[in-house]
């Protein structure tokens, strides 16, 4: 459940929003006034946080958008099997199996700490933490 609701005109680059139920980061925003009695329109280009797909959103400026709840946490890699990492949360000691992103394949090793994000119940490894 989102914690915050914003108007489409407030979705500046770098802000996280939900587009079709998928958490995304806004890359560009174009605002246009349509005429004498028309409403302002917002064209938003966003990139999915988890899947990396580009999404385009065209909404009236007063339209409300959901902001996803992103919980940034730390974990330690216990073991690796194939492209999946068995990870333990440093604070709760919960064990989680997560896929290793392609760009982090070389950096993720057993025993290192990583930062992972819990985005509306979806978990993804974002970076390796070096001491």
Image (cartoon, helix red, strand yellow):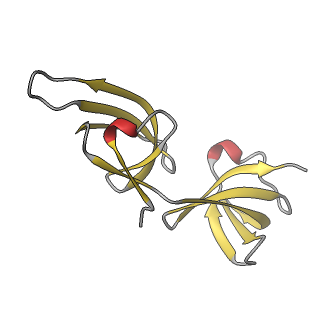
Give 111 or 21, whichever is nearer the viewer.
21
User: Which corner quadrant of the image does residue 81 belong to?
Assistant: bottom right
Is 62 positioned to the left or the right of 127 in the image? left
Q: Where is residue 15 in the image (x, y as percent from the top left)?
A: 49, 41
Query: Is 3 above or below relative to 105?
Result: below
Query: Who is closer to the viewer here, 93 or 81?
Result: 93
Whole-percent x and y of residue 61?
26, 37
Residue at image x 66%, y 72%? Answer: 96
Q: Where is residue 14 in the image (x, y as percent from the top left)?
A: 52, 37
Foreground residue among 84 and 63: 63
The extreme front residue here reads 36
Residue 85 position in % (x across, y down):
70, 64
Look at the picture and state if 56 lies above or below 24. above
| Residue that appears at 39% across and 38% down | 10
Q: Quadrant of residue 11?
A: top left
Q: Quadrant of the N terminus?
A: bottom left
Q: On the rendered structure, is 95 left or right of 29?
A: right
Q: In this view, does 122 lie above or below 14?
A: below
Could you tell whether 99 is left or right of 113 in the image? left
Q: Residue at x 48, y 64 (%)?
A: 120
Front-lying residue, 50 or 78: 50
Q: How many marks?
A: 0
Q: Please tell me in which quadrant of the rendered image residue 70 appears.
A: bottom right
Q: In this view, does 39 lie to the left or right of 95?
A: left
Q: Residue at x 22, y 30 (%)?
A: 40
């Amino acid at each position: 459940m989102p914690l915050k609701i914003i108007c489409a005109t407030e979705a500046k680059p770098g802000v996280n929003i939900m587009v079709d139920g998928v958490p995304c980061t806004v890359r560009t925003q174009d605002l246009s006034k349509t005429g004498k009695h028309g409403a302002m329109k917002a064209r938003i280009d966003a990139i999915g946080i988890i899947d990396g797909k580009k999404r385009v959103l065209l909404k009236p400026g007063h339209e409300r958008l959901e902001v996803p709840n992103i919980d940034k946490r730390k974990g330690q890699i216990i073991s690796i099997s194939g492209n999946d990492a068995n990870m333990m949360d440093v604070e709760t000691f919960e064990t989680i199996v997560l896929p290793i992103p392609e760009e982090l394949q070389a950096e993720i090793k057993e025993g290192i700490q990583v930062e992972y994000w819990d985005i509306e119940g979806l978990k993804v490894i974002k970076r390796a933490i070096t001491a």
